[in-house]
Image (tube, rainbow, N blue to C red):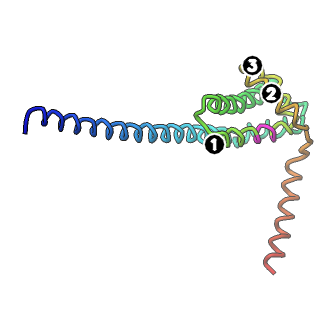
Amino acid sequence: MSLSDLAAIGSFVSAIAVVFSFVFLALQIRQSNLNQRSLIQQGRSTRRIELLLRRADPDLSDIMERAFRGDPSLSSAQIMSYFLLVQAIFEGYEDTFLQHKAGTIDASSWEIEAVHIRSVFANMAIRIGWRRVRTEFANDFRDLIDSLMAATKAEDFGDISRTWKAAVIMETRRSGRAAK
């Protein structure tokens, strides 16, 4: 075997190694993208859970419930707490919006968020809160949220305690019928 034959074999082996390297690199990039999307989704979930747990705090829950009822007796500090909560809610929405714009979350994740935004805008207090904090956000997000709010009809949620009691009675009756 001549030196040129060895060089040809070496070139062939080298070419195969390059192809395998590119395939391996493509697989690594794909896995890295999946991992990145997973981390982004995990971050969204963590943020949402943190906010829900924060909202479950009895003092903040009381403020929210009273704001949702349109209670005019909220103190200035309670109103400020409420507006800060609303801003935190919309900061989370904006992050998801920006992630969607950047292509790092899929369309269905953004659509779920948009559905949630429309549902919260049924509440008068959220609408008031958004109008108060909207200047804190970029124009494209603000315009989108304004359009979602305009397309959503405000509803009166009434007394949450009375609604809860009625739901408990209804569920108890359903359970009683199912048990017979």
Q: Position of residue 124 (x, y in %)?
A: 88, 34
Q: Amino acid at mark 1?
A: Ile
Q: Measure the C-alpha gap from mark 3 to mark 1.
A: 27 Å
Q: Residues within 10 Å of mark 1 (few under 14, many from 20)?
A: few
Q: Residues within 10 Å of mark 2 (few under 14, many from 20)?
A: many
Q: Position of residue 130 (x, y in %)?
A: 80, 27
Mark 3: secondary structure: helix
Please tell me whether mark 3 or mark 2 is closer to you in this view.
3
* Residue at the spot 33% in from the left edge and 38% down from the top edge: 19
| Of 175 and 152, the residue lying toward us | 152
Q: Amino acid at mark 3?
A: Asn
Judged by its main secondary structure, the magenta piece is: helix
Tell me if 32 is positioned left or right of 160 in this view: left
* Residue at the spot 32% in from the left edge and 41% down from the top edge: 20
Q: Which residue is mark 1?
A: 49
**What is the magenta range?**
115-119
Q: Which badge, 2 or 1, comes first in the chain's sequence?
A: 1
Mark 1: secondary structure: helix
Q: Measure the C-alpha gap from mark 3 to mark 2.
A: 14 Å
Q: Which residue is mark 2?
A: 130
Q: Position of residue 79 (x, y in %)?
A: 80, 27
Q: Amino acid at mark 2?
A: Trp
Mark 2: secondary structure: helix
Indicate the quadrant where residue 69 lies. Answer: top right
Q: How many marks?
A: 3
Q: Which residue is mark 3?
A: 139
